[in-house]
Structures are given as C-alpha cells and as structure tokens.
Amino acid sequence: MEPAEVLRLIKTRRSVRRYSGQPLSEQELEMVLEAGRWAPSGQNNQPWRFAVVAEPAVKDQIAPLTRYGKIIQGAAALICCFAHLPSMYHEVKDHQSIGACLQNMLLMAHGAGLGAVWLGEILKSAAQVRQVLGLGEELELMAVLALGRPGPGNPQSSRKPLAELVLGRYDP
C-alpha cells in the first residue's frame, strides 16, 4: 500500500454514530478484532481483551449505562475492550497500547467500509458493564467500540492546522 493511501485512510476515518441496521458478518467482526490483536504493546504483553456483543438483549442492558445508549442500540455489534490487569507491566504504557489497539480496529472498520465510534463516557459505568457481561475484576473497561454499516447523516470533521500543534523542530 502506498503511503498516500494510508494517510488517506487515516484522514477519511470518522466517528460513525448512525447505522443502517444491517448485521455484520462473522468475517467482518473477526477482521476488526484481528487488527486490534496486532497493535504494538510493550514487551509484547498484549494486555487487551475483547467482549463482542451483538445480542440485542445484552445491548439493551448496556445502553442505559451511558448517555450514548441510542448509539449502542443502533450498532450491529459492540466490542468492549478491557485491560487484562494481570498482563500489565506499566499502567501508562499498557493504556497507550490499548489506545493503539482501539485505533487499529477503528481504521480496519473504516477500511472495510464499516462505521465505528470509540465510546469512552461509558467508563463511568465500567463495573456495571463487567457485571452485565459476567466478567471478573481482573478486567478494566477501557472503551466500547460501536460498529455497524454507516447510515445517513454522519457528520464531517476537521483538524487544527499542523503549525498549531507542532511545538518546535530540533533539526540539525
């Protein structure tokens, strides 16, 4: 793949909050999860764990735990991403790795023509999400990715100019 194509994929990815209602195939979900699995992690500890939720009854239990419940209910599937605490060796570094894992999944979803959004506000209800899913305290909720086929009305985005973000250059 050409570098320009990679940059185009990165620049055109958007947070998709409205979905068509069509289901995702097992292969599509597997592809997104596989992209997350291949994220970099310190000491290759791979501290992430995933719970995939497509069952409407389970989504209905998770939806009231966030102010973005309509997104949860409209998504074809959720990927609840957890930090596996026994696998971690450095909190900041492992959390950064999980961020890379989430970004890999978002980019793969976009590249596959799917829509996805990273939901973080649900972290206020992390214990309840774990309880709904029947998971233990060795797992710390990091985010929920809502996935589906994009529906109409998803917004565009913009970015600050690069000159505003670069603090300085220290070239020889």
Image (cartoon, helix red, strand yellow):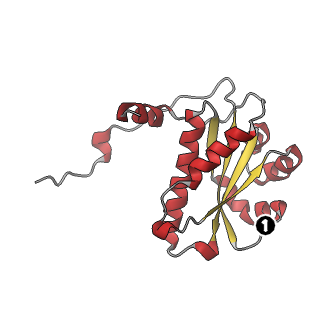
Q: Amino acid at mark 1?
A: Leu
In this rendering, is residue 140 above or below 158? below
The local crowd at label 1, few if under 14, some if 14 to 19, many if 20 or more residues have their Cα within 10 Å, is some
Instruction: Where is residue 118? Give x, y as percent.
Output: 61, 47
Residue 163, quarter of the rendered image: top left
Q: Is residue 150 above or below residue 98?
A: above
Q: Nearer the viewer, residue 62 or 26?
A: 26
Q: Which corner quadrant holds the C terminus?
A: bottom left
SS under mark 1: loop
Q: Is residue 158 visible?
A: no
Question: What residue sits 37% from the left and 32% below the top?
Answer: 2
User: Which residue is rendered at x = 57% and y = 43% of the image?
Assistant: 106
Taking the spot 74% from the left edge, 27% from the top edge, the residue there is 20
Residue 75 position by quadrant: top right
- Residue 164 located left or right of residue 14: left
* 50 and 13: which is toward the camera: 50
| Residue that extends furthest to the left in the rendered view of this protein | 172
The image shows residue 18 at horizontal and vertical percentages of 69, 32
Residue 161: x and y in percent read 33, 37
Residue identifier under label 1 = 135
